[in-house]
Image (cartoon, grey):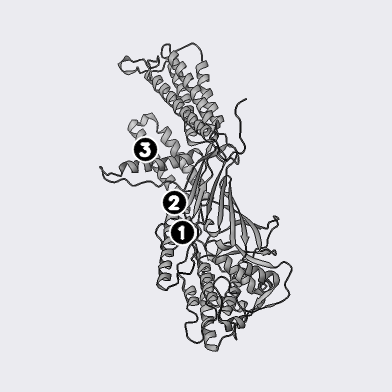
Amino acid sequence: MLDSIRRTSTTSDEFTGPAVDRTVELPSARISFMTSIAVGVLLILAIAGTPTSLGPWVLWVTRFGAALVGGLILLLYTRRRYGKVMRESRRQTTIWHLPDYQVNILQRSAGRSGGPLTPELAGVAQAKAFTFSVIYPADVRQRITERYEPSQRTLKQRVTIDAQLPGWIVRQLVTGERQDHATEAARGVGNEQGMTVGATRRSDAPAQPTVLFPVLIPRKGEMVDNLHVLAADESTLPVLSYRQYLQLVARVLRTLLTIAYGGSLNQQSQATVFQAEHDALRGVIRRARGNIKDDTGSQGIAMLGDEGARPLSNHAARGLAAKLVKKLTSHYAIVAAVPCPADGRLVITYERLITPTLELAPRPRWTRRGDSDQPARLGGTLKWFKARLRLLFGARPVDISVALDNAWTTQSYHLVLDGQEGVFVGSQESRNLIKYLMVHWDRIKRRRHETIQNWARQSQLGETLETPPPPYYRFRRRAGQRYAHFYTRFFPEPVENLVDGETVPKVRFRFYEVPPGSVFRAAVTAVASALLVWLIGFVTSRKPDPGTDVPAFLLVFPAIAAAWLGFEGQTRRLLEGTLASRLSLLTTVLTSIAASGLFMIYKSGLPYLHWSNPFDMRIVGIESLSWTVLVLVAVLNACFVTFAYLGRTSEFILLSGRMDTFGGVVEHGDD
């Protein structure tokens, strides 16, 4: 089958088509330059004003007018330069669907367009392996290990698939068994998974045949970036192009229909089958974004054999064809050509880059007074403000949610999220996970109970019913490590229109800095700033001119230290300072600069800010209200950031010091 796909892929690129995207015309360089000049002139006019000879009224009117006109110009330019770009970026790309004759070309690539359905029998085993891997991935994939490595803005995903092909497929691939469809049709036997019961005949087979294995089945419209598919020995595996993939689907569908009808059809049934195949392939090649609910093609395949012209010889093949078409109508498969060993054990790894979506807290809408939800809305507003503040200050603690899309496609699933040095797992949760598992487990038990009741009514109590084991999951316990590990077995497949069981849940991980981190640096500078501000405020409030300019220089040091310790960018860091440390450092900078300026005002004797505390109070030995405010701000800043540092350190010590009942390696902190 792979050779036939290669032969037919030498034709022109018939399965691609244009996609139109809206482009945004940005302001020209001339407009940008003129806008900058105009705004600059108006800004100078708003600051400088007019000559004093014209009077204060003209001065303030001119300033207000210049500021208003400059703001309007800047607003219009911003809407043109940035607002329009952001609005256009949210619009969907216009997709041009392929014309109908492309389906005819695809049908011809699967076999002759006229006469009986007689595809090459050499690809029957590959067709079964591909179909079984797409429809029943959990029966093929024994274990999946999914690992994420965060970088500056992207995630490197590495997924290792440990698969085991069914024995009946391996025998056909390795030993070269071919299915005799006429004999099977005469017997009228077959099952949904096997489709191999019947007479077989042997032919020469290669020493190590190739399996066309679907390593990744994303939704239509989802792009895959920088994909690399590797074998067990880390060698690169060839991946079918999209055109070759479509030809593969056409040949697989033709093979399944051939098996369903036993290899021969009369004229009336043949026309019906070709029409159903045409509708199915039209749905497969349809371009779309997201999930597609239209399953007309799969329904047409499922109704084959009901026309009465000729009964089907293998209903299981028809069912598999319908399921395959339904799956590939809303998804597309990335297929790799994998050498198949004699035992059918495959180890495949693929790597790709993922750009996570930045999800910020939405701003809640406030309603009338007295609403019972006002406290919740207040908390939502604080979250909204905190999220924007974190971006503004460049605080980047890792907080990532990973959807468990691969969990239900395997029997055993491992999810590992790596952090870089200097962080540890702070929290790990999945809000809807337990509800999702309980809903599906109740559904499985209910279906089993109904089946037992039906068997009891039909006097089939001697039959045995295999019930899948209940789902199981657990998190790797937090122990101060820099990676998170989630494990699950027998994860249920999502079911449409099932309440709380239709959407696959997500697992959320959050990482914190390992002490000391940026919070410790912020605490040191905050404490130093508080001590200096208090000391100089204590002296200056009693003697405005101490006879030296040393306090002014001393007050600048905390600001310099805060800027150097907290805001110096480091490349490829997982997190560049928490929000608490950034806010503390910013407060330290502003407090130190304000204290230095206040000292110079007192020393020069300017009549500003010489206020006394109310009721003649002395707060920490200071009588001046200005110095008291600065000292209190500095002290509160030092207390809050120190508390955050001590709390985070205590949490890390508690997590790291918990005894592991399973033994293993122990790290000693004593001498």
Q: Earlier in the sequence, mark 3 or mark 1?
A: 3
Tags 2 and 1 in contact by the CB under 8 Å rule?
A: no
Secondary structure of the residue carrying numbered label 2: helix
Q: Quadrant of the N terminus?
A: bottom right
Which residue corresponds to mark 1? 91
Q: Amino acid at mark 2?
A: Ile
Above or below, comparing residue 572 to residue 460 in the picture: above
Above or below, comparing residue 651 to residue 359 in the picture: above
Residue closest to the eye, 146 or 530: 146
Distance of mark 2 from mark 1, alpha carbons? 36 Å
Which residue corresponds to mark 2? 434
Side of 202 where 650 appears, left or right: left
Q: Amino acid at mark 1?
A: Arg
Distance of mark 3 from mark 2, alpha carbons? 60 Å
Q: Can you tell which quarter of the image residue 334 is in?
A: bottom right
Q: Amino acid at mark 3?
A: Phe
Which residue corresponds to mark 3? 64
Picture coordinates of residue 661 (x, y %)?
55, 39
Picture coordinates of residue 612 (x, y %)?
35, 17
Residue visible at 44% across and 28% down? Answer: 640
Q: Can you tell which quarter of the image residue 103 is in?
A: bottom right
Q: Residues within 10 Å of mark 3 (few under 14, many from 20)?
A: some
* Residue 99 in sight from this viewpoint: no
Q: Residues within 10 Å of mark 2 (few under 14, many from 20)?
A: few
Q: Earlier in the sequence, mark 3 or mark 2?
A: 3
Q: Can you tell which quarter of the image residue 17 is in?
A: bottom right
Secondary structure of the residue carrying numbered label 1: loop
Secondary structure of the residue carrying numbered label 3: helix
Number of the front mark, 3 or 2: 2
Side of 166 where 400 appears, left or right: left
Residue closest to the eye, 337 or 15: 337
